[in-house]
Image: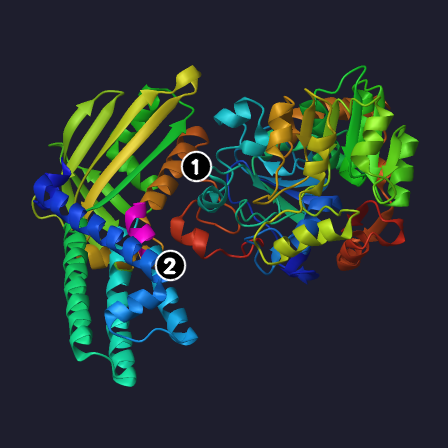
């Protein structure tokens, strides 16, 4: 599945956003450099008097802010957060120019031009932020990927997984899986806030000792699909397992966010599930400590019991 | 039962806690006859290891008598006398199969926390933070020993507790320091730290045929103990260690350097000590890596630096240039105790070594808090505290 198909935006639209965001980053750097290097000149141009030390310090501080934002935007990660800080900066700039203009009684024309320019920049920032937010919105689809090595043969590992009714013994959020004679499986899992979610699933790919894929069918509480691949680990070290889960959590993005706050970070949860799977295959049961008496669990790792015997 | 619990920075308390019960098939419950305070417990005591919780039962050096076994334990019976290795290891995962039991892939149910801090998780340890498992320790009357069929080492009753207790940690740890440094006949070895682990590192170097061992510390009685084992000694408050080591080795430096100190090192130069002490206090580095820096600077070209002192997180001013350009090797690790226990038990049986030489204090379990205080202050000639429940 390509990203374009996922949220229905063309590469051309993406390029447009990239250009706008990049431009804002360069603009921040240029303005910041000017404010730091020649604060008086910038202040005069903007129509405010900047010759007193306090004024000059303000202009320089704003310049530093622009430099940081420019670097943040061009730096790569978290672009949308940095663009949003630019909007906050715009508001601050407008307030400062208005206050400065009122107090110092400078050229009305120049002040007007400056405010118009600031309004234009603000509009560009808002447009860029909205576009970035739209592109980040994947329609609420969640994805979790994790891998582990199990010191057992592909055949044994595959067999254990292929019996879907085994999955609840190591996947923390599953209550039960039942397979009917027609090969369709009925799943019950713990949803947000302790609710029960149900769905039916069908196997869509099954290559013995290599791969198993499944997806939910019509009417699922949580639309989801998944695949697990098995391959021999180098050096006879058993089997490498890679699991890839995709799902649309109930409540969309908000639901996913709430789940995260409750400690249900999907990648971590899947890694913990796989560690339990490894324990079940290698040792025959889930390993418990007094701090984590129910074994590997993402939520329990946050809310530990003291390391004292369980009464 | 009574158990010594961590109750906060610089505070431990003997409390009543529930008796342990079997939680997994391969568990055994051991009635503890002897347990000890380890130098690494002092890192917990000083609040330097993250993810401790109030009420955690401490202690990872213990031995005792099996009083109950889970259905998956077929090689131990009630009444067996056992020494328990401090790392918890399953014996069947890839790491255990290679003998790297302090890296067991299955024993840490809180691997997710350790992974966030270290990239990958090592094995769980008894009584050593929640990041490393959240298992209660052995400074108690009883302990649950997971994977007892793989971990617990049976010992015959002729050997008294004090001769075999340290097979749980400090003797194998010291030995692994020498093993990782590939110490052998003809070697000159420098050992930083003449605490209990340093003493066993020194003794192990001699067991492996080292020609000369130089112990570095600042505490008189510890240096004297090292001398009794046959080591030459340096007091780092009196001399510049790299200069003295160069002089003692014809300018080459020691072939092998063992760091038996770790994250809470002291430095003779007050300003240098304050530099790292301050950074550690405000949390911008977790270690005071004086020993690591000095060991790298002192080690002979092409030599090996072996690290058995405990580190917790991030180190500043690591002398990478010296390390790389002089073809040094560094090896490190929590001890893979299971791998070393049988051969070291043989050394004890044969009378090659009597590990009880480090014991200076014997206290009832109820006086554990006093034991911690005496040990951390190095008061009253304290080298090693053994507690009896």
Residue A291 in the image, given as x and y percentages of width and height: 51, 52
Q: Is residue A307 left or right of residue A24?
A: right
Determine the residue positioned at 43% across, 32% down: A284
Please, which chain is the residue tagged with disc 2 on? A
Image quadrant in which you'd find residue A5: top left
Q: Which residue is mark 2?
A: A37
Instruction: Name the one closer to the observer, B63 or A266.
Output: A266
Instruction: Name the one closer to the observer, A170 or A7.
Output: A7
**Counting residues from the N terminus, which is met first, the one under dot 2 or under dot 1?**
2
Question: Which mark is drawn over residue A285?
Answer: 1
Determine the residue positioned at 26% across, 75% down: A97
SS at mark 2? helix
Residue A270 in the image, given as x and y percentages of width and height: 33, 41
Q: Compared with residue A40, is residue A144 higher up or lower down, i.e. above or below? A: above
Examine the rendering and report whether any part of residue A128 can be seen: yes
Residue B297 in the image, given as x and y percentages of width and height: 71, 32
Residue A74 forms part of the magenta stretch: yes
Please, which chain is the residue tagged with disc 1 on? A
Q: Main secondary structure of the magenta part?
A: helix
Gap between marks 2 and 1 measured at Cα:
67 Å
Instruction: Name the one closer to the observer, A134 or B89.
Output: A134
Q: Is residue B275 left or right of residue A232?
A: right
| The C terminus of chain A sits in image quarter | bottom right
SS at mark 1? loop
Examine the rendering and report whether any part of residue A190 can be seen: no
Q: Which residues are magenta?
A: A69-76
Image quadrant in which you'd find residue A95: bottom left
Residue A219 in the image, given as x and y percentages of width and height: 8, 48
């Amino acid at each position: 599945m390509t990203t374009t198909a996922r949220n229905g935006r063309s590469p051309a639209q993406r390029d447009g956003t990239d250009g706008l965001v990049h431009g804002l980053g360069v603009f921040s750097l240029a303005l910041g450099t000017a404010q730091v290097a020649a604060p008086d000149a910038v202040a005069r141009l903007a129509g405010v008097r900047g010759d007193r030390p306090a004024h000059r310090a303000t202009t320089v501080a704003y310049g530093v802010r622009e430099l940081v934002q420019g670097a943040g935007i061009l730096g790569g990660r978290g672009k949308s957060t940095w663009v949003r800080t630019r909007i906050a900066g715009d508001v601050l700039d407008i307030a400062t120019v208005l206050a400065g203009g009122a107090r110092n009684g400078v050229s009305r024309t120049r002040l007007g031009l400056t405010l118009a320019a600031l309004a234009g920049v603000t509009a560009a920032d808002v447009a860029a932020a909205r576009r970035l937010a739209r592109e980040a919105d994947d329609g609420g689809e969640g994805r979790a990927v994790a891998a582990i090595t199990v010191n057992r043969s592909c055949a044994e590992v595959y067999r254990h997984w292929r019996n879907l009714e085994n999955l609840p013994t190591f996947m923390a959020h599953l209550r039960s899986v039942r397979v009917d004679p027609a090969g369709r499986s009925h799943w019950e899992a713990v949803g947000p806030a302790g609710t029960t979610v149900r769905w039916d699933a069908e196997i869509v790919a099954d290559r013995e000792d290599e791969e198993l894929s499944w997806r939910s069918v019509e009417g699922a509480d949580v639309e989801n699909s998944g695949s697990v691949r098995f391959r021999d680990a180098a050096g006879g070290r058993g089997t490498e397992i890679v699991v890839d889960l995709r799902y649309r959590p109930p409540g969309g993005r908000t639901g996913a966010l709430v789940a995260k706050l409750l400690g249900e970070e999907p990648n971590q949860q899947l890694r913990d599930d796989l560690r339990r799977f490894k324990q079940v295959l290698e040792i025959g049961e889930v390993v418990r400590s007094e701090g984590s008496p129910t074994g590997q669990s993402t939520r329990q790792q946050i809310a530990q019991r003291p390391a004292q015997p369980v009464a | 039962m009574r158990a010594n619990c961590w109750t906060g920075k610089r505070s431990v308390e003997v409390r009543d806690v529930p008796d342990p019960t079997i939680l997994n098939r391969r568990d055994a419950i051991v009635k503890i006859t002897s347990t000890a305070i380890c130098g690494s417990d002092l890192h917990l005591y000083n609040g330097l290891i993250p993810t401790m919780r109030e009420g955690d039962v401490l202690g990872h050096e213990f031995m005792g008598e099996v009083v109950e076994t889970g259905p998956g334990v077929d090689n131990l019976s009630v009444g067996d006398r056992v020494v328990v290795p401090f790392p918890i290891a399953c014996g069947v995962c890839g790491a255990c199969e290679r003998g790297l039991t302090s890296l067991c892939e299955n024993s840490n149910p809180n691997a997710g926390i350790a992974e966030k801090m270290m990239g990958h998780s090592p094995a769980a340890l008894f009584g050593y933070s929640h990041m490393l498992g959240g298992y209660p320790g052995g400074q108690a009357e009883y302990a649950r020993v997971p994977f007892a069929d793989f971990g617990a080492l049976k010992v015959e009753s002729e050997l008294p507790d004090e001769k075999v207790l340290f097979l749980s940690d400090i003797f194998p740890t010291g030995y692994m320091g020498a093993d990782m440094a590939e110490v052998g006949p003809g070697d000159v070895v420098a050992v930083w730290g003449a605490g209990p682990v340093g003493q066993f590192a020194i003794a192990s170097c001699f067991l492996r045929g080292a020609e000369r061992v130089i112990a570095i510390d600042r505490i008189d009685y510890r240096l004297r103990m090292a001398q009794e084992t046959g080591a030459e000694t340096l007091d780092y408050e009196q001399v510049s260690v790299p200069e003295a080591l160069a002089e003692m080795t014809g300018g080459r430096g020691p072939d092998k350097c063992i760091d038996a100190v770790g994250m809470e090192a002291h430095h003779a130069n007050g300003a240098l000590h304050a530099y790292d002490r301050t950074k550690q206090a405000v949390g911008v580095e977790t270690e005071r890596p004086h020993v690591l820096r000095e060991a790298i600077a002192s080690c002979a070209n092409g030599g090996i630096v072996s690290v058995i002192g405990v580190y917790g997180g991030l180190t500043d001013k690591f002398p990478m240039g010296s390390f790389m350009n002089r073809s040094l090797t560094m090896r490190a690790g929590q001890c893979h105790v299971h791998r070393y226990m049988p051969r070291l038990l043989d050394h004890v049986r044969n009378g090659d070594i009597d590990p009880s030489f480090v014991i200076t204090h014997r206290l009832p379990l109820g006086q554990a808090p006093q034991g911690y205080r005496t040990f951390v202050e190095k008061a009253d000639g304290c080298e090693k505290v053994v507690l009896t429940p």
